[in-house]
Image: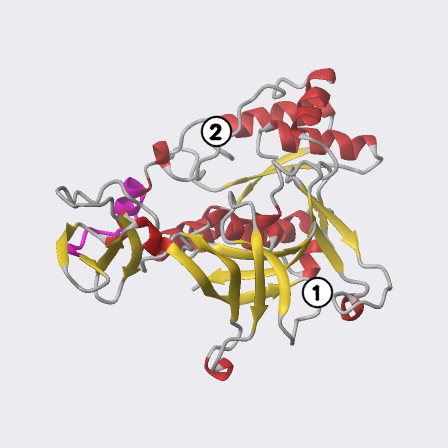
């Protein structure tokens, strides 16, 4: 329970369905931490709101200490990725390693058999059928898009393993956000109108550069160059940039707008160019997770290279020199896409079914 309307209604619905429900909030930072806003997910106000909802629903409520796990698995990863010139996605890691990892194990100690969250997603069980896509995946748990496509959060859940999906419940998967708020208002939950945060929960004031400095990622001056190697200016650290970025380059007097095309961490260089050079027709993903039988032949998919992307047609196949790229797949796009960003997830779909995904290299 994050203190928001979604997890509050999820708890209510499960109780209505006859489940024996307990409320859990994981604390990710010390209680006296001054850098976290009160209303951030799992912050002091969020805990107070979740406790109030649990009391109104007459369910037991616990605050679970996940400070060390969250720092190690999520916050340290976040800083390290930026330092490597990649753009991290901490929500995917948090779901896999904290909410459905460490928190699930601690919930088991309280007698819980499943973990339910307020995510907008659905889980189904594969039925026996003979198709190239699913015949080897019969009996597996299937992750599917939510009915409310605008709120669908399967992108952030793609990395959950089969054993984690088997223990997961998403009560809001068949509902729209409007319906969820209506339920909350109808039953008198004070969180029904609470705004939802779109920011990274542990980054104060949404200033990730300030967070990185506090995490020991210091400025390191380097060159801003073109693809041809021409030096146009200098930067204070590649962690200040991401692929597709235009602002903050401070390259006045250029004949055309320039964008970040690539971050070369080895040479500490920011490579820039015009907008058309942001288009890419192919990329690779590593550390793939599959919710179907791992494909051997090329697989036609819809891929989302970032959460807000609508998805585009692609073919996933083993890369050339596959023996040197174990666990990787090549993603060939039928139409080139803008700003494919290393560190983000590339998630594969067939209609509403999540086939799998990996991390953009």
- Dividing the picture into quarters, in which one does residue 224 lie? bottom left
Residue 127 at least partly seen: yes
x and y percent of residue 252 in the render? 14, 42
Left or right of 29? Residue 214 is left
- Dividing the picture into quarters, in which one does residue 204 lie? top left
Residue 58 drawn in magenta:
no
Residue shown at 15% from the left, 54% from the top = 221
User: Looking at the figure, which quarter contains the N terminus?
Assistant: top right
x and y percent of residue 2 in the render? 57, 34
Residue 35 at least partly seen: no
Residue shown at 39% from the left, 33% from the top = 36
Disc 1 and disc 2: Cα gap in Å? 40 Å
x and y percent of residue 319 in the render? 50, 75
Left or right of 169? Residue 203 is left
Answer with mark 1 or mark 2, whichever residue precedes in sequence: 2
| SS at mark 2 in the image | helix
x and y percent of residue 102 in the render? 58, 53
Q: Which mark is residue 44?
A: 2
73 or 244: nearer the eye? 244
Residue 218 drawn in magenta:
yes
Looking at the rendering, the stretch of residues picked out in magenta corresponds to: 209-224
Q: Which mark is residue 292?
A: 1
Left or right of 286? Residue 177 is right
Q: Which of marks 1 and 2 is in front?
A: 1
């Amino acid at each position: 329970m994050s203190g928001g309307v979604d997890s509050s209604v999820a708890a209510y619905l499960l109780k209505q369905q006859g489940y024996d429900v307990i409320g859990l909030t994981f604390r990710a930072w010390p209680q006296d931490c001054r850098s976290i806003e009160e209303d951030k997910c799992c912050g002091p106000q969020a805990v107070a709101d979740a406790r109030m909802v649990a009391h109104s629903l007459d369910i037991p409520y616990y605050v679970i200490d996940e400070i060390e796990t969250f720092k190690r698995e999520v916050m340290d990863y976040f800083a390290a990725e930026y330092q490597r010139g990649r753009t991290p996605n901490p929500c995917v890691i948090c779901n896999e390693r904290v909410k459905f990892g460490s928190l699930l194990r601690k919930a088991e100690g309280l007698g819980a058999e499943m973990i339910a969250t307020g995510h907008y997603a659905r889980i189904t069980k594969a039925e026996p059928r003979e198709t190239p896509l699913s015949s080897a995946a019969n009996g597996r748990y299937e992750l599917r898009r939510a009915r409310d496509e605008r709120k669908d959060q399967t992108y952030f859940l793609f990395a959950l393993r089969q054993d984690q999906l088997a223990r997961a419940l998403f009560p809001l998967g068949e509902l729209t956000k409007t319906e969820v708020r209506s339920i909350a208002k109808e039953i008198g939950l004070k969180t029904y109108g609470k705004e939802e945060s779109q920011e990274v929960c542990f980054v104060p004031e949404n200033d990730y550069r300030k967070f990185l400095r506090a995490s020991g990622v210091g400025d390191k001056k380097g060159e801003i160059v073109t693809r041809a190697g021409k030096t146009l200016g200098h930067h204070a650290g590649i962690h200040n940039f991401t692929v597709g970025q235009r602002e903050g380059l401070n390259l006045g007097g250029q004949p055309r707008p320039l964008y970040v095309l690539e971050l070369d961490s080895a040479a500490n260089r920011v490579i820039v160019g015009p907008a058309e050079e942001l288009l890419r027709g192919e990329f690779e993903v590593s550390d793939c997770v599959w919710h179907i039988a791992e494909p051997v032949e090329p697989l036609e998919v819809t891929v989302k290279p970032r959460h807000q992307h609508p998805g585009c047609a692609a073919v996933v196949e083993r890369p050339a020199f596959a023996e040197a790229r174990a666990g990787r797949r090549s993603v060939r796009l039928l139409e080139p896409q803008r700003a494919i960003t290393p560190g983000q997830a590339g998630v594969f779909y067939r209609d509403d079914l999540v086939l799998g995904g990996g991390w953009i290299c």
